[in-house]
Image: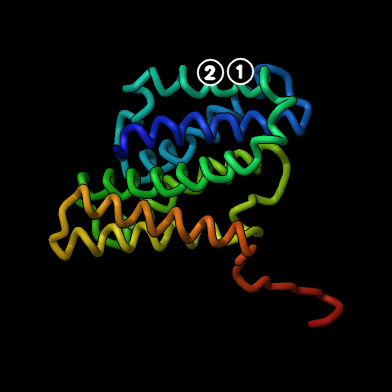
């Protein structure tokens, strides 16, 4: 199940990257680069930090084709995208949760400590979007909008906790995936966010 979801997530994230590039009036090469970085950037950062070489996507060329295809398809259907906004929000949530679980799996297989496993999951889940937003010249969405990174944190902790309790891999994945998706949908529906820190030099001196 997770593999199929992962393919959907890669394609959805690539398309969101392509849309972001389009909003900045980038050329076809720019669209392809942003689509690639959005879809595979989180996993790349994770592999580098964990010393997991070779980097995963270099061993799976199909991932590259999927991101490029997603970017090109987005260009072709861009005029209809405003009607698909809700679908993309759901696909993005699916991608966040799937990438988080996969990131945890990678760290577990490498024998890292629990806190590193959690950070690996979060990094995989959110860093593609962070890279996308930085490349497009805006404050990363994960740092200023509805609860996003916190969903990744909850998924990673729950996933690791259930595994440590001896729950089967399949049940653990399903439980973590369901909880994460539900939390993200609730955050979107009711615009749930963390408190905002506002600092003004004039106010604080």
Q: Is residue 32 above or below residue 187?
A: above
Determine whether, in the image, residue 186 is placed left or right of residue 23. left
Front residue of 52 and 163 = 163
Residue at image position (34%, 30%) is 56
Q: Is residue 71 visible?
A: yes
Return the x and y of residue 136 as percentages of the image width and height. Answer: 70, 38
Q: Please tell me how crowded label 1 is: few (under 14), some (14-19), or many (20+) other residues with Cα within 10 Å.
A: some
State which quadrant residue 157 falls in: bottom left
The image's mark for residue 108 is none
Instruction: Single out the residue that lies furthest toward the right.
Output: 202
Residue hosting label 1? 72
Residue toward you, 154 or 133: 154
Label 2 CA crowd tier, 10 Å (few <14, some 14–19, many 20+): some
Cα distance between the residues tagged 2 and 1: 5 Å
The quadrant of the image that shows the C terminus is bottom right
Residue at 38 percent of width and 35 percent of height: 6
Residue 50 in the image: x percent, y percent?
Answer: 32, 45
Residue under numbered circle 2: 69
Residue drawn at x 34%, y 22% is 60
Frontmost residue, 126 versus 154: 154
Quarter of the rendering occupied by the N terminus: top left
Image coordinates of residue 123 in percent, x first then y, are: 44, 49
**Whether residue 61 is situated above or below residue 38 in the rendered picture:** above
- What is the secondary structure assignment of the residue under circle 2? helix
Q: Is residue 71 above or below residue 131?
A: above
Circles 2, 1 touching at the beta carbon (< 8 Å):
yes
Does residue 20 show up? no
């Amino acid at each position: 199940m997770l593999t199929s979801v992962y393919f959907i997530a890669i394609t959805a994230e690539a398309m969101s990257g392509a849309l972001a590039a389009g909003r900045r009036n980038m050329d076809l090469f720019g669209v392809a680069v942003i689509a690639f970085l959005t879809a595979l950037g989180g996993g790349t950062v994770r592999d580098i930090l964990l010393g997991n070489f070779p980097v995963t996507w270099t061993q799976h060329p199909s991932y590259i084709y999927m991101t490029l295809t997603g970017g090109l398809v987005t260009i072709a259907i861009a005029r209809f995208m405003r009607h698909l906004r809700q679908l993309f929000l759901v696909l993005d949530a699916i991608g966040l949760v799937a990438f988080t679980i996969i990131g945890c799996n990678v760290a577990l297989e490498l024998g890292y400590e629990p806190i590193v496993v959690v950070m690996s999951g979060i990094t995989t889940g959110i860093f593609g979007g962070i890279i996308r937003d930085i490349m497009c010249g805006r404050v990363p969405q994960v740092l200023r909008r509805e609860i996003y990174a916190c969903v990744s944190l909850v998924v990673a902790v729950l996933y690791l906790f259930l595994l440590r309790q001896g729950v089967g891999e399949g049940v653990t994945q399903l439980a973590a995936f369901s909880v994460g998706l539900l939390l993200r949908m609730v955050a979107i529906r009711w615009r749930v966010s963390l408190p905002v820190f506002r600092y003004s030099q004039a106010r604080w001196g």
